[in-house]
Every structure is written in structure tokens, then in C-alpha cells.
Amino acid sequence: MQIKPRWIINHAIHGRATIIPSSIRYFRNRKHPYGWELGFQAALELADGSRAKATFSALGTSRNAAMANALPR
């Protein structure tokens, strides 16, 4: 059994939080004239242990670049 990685981000409202990858739900995942358009909602695990939902979206030259642009680091 493989342990899935957790992504640590700096969210504007919640501060330092961890994205739970299994909670990601895509509402936009398609090619765009500028490359790739990505939009998703995910659950965040906050520093105090509680959970919140957040929405992320971005454009990128590839799908990986769009994911990197969507996540606030």
C-alpha cells in the first residue's frame, strides 16, 4: 500500500494548510488556446486539525504547469 503525498500550501484565508489529494474534484480540466485550463475543489487540513474546502483554478502551458500555477506556494 502506497501512502499518498500531501501538499502544503499557503492559503490566503486559512494560512498554512495541507491539501488532501483524494478530495480533489475537477470541474474544469481541458485544453485551452493558451495551453491547459484546470479548475478543482479540494479539502484542506488546517493547522489546528480542522478541515475546510477551497477552490483553485489556473492556466498553464501543460496540465502540470496549470496545477503548479493553481496552488499558492
Image (tube, helix red, strand yellow):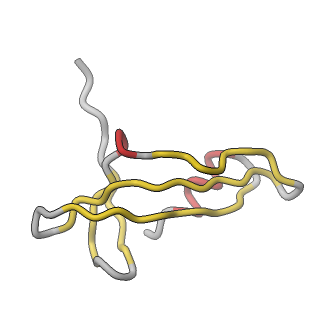
Most extreme residue toward the top, as rendered?
Answer: 1
Image coordinates of residue 23 in percent, x first then y, are 36, 45
Q: Is residue 1 above or below residue 14?
A: above
Q: Nearer the viewer, residue 45 or 10?
A: 45
| Residue at 34 percent of width and 53 percent of height | 7
Q: How many marks?
A: 0
| Residue at 64 percent of width and 55 percent of height | 66
Q: Is residue 34 above or below residue 15?
A: above
Q: Is residue 71 left or right of residue 22?
A: right
Kindly indicate the quadrant of the structure image that contains residue 51: bottom left
Q: Is residue 37 left or right of residue 57?
A: right
Q: Nearer the viewer, residue 32 or 5?
A: 32
Most extreme residue toward the right, as rendered?
Answer: 33
Q: Quadrant of the C terminus?
A: bottom left
| Residue at 37 percent of width and 74 percent of height | 11
Image coordinates of residue 1 in percent, x first then y, are 23, 17
| Residue at 28 percent of width and 64 percent of height | 52
Image coordinates of residue 31 in percent, x first then y, are 80, 46
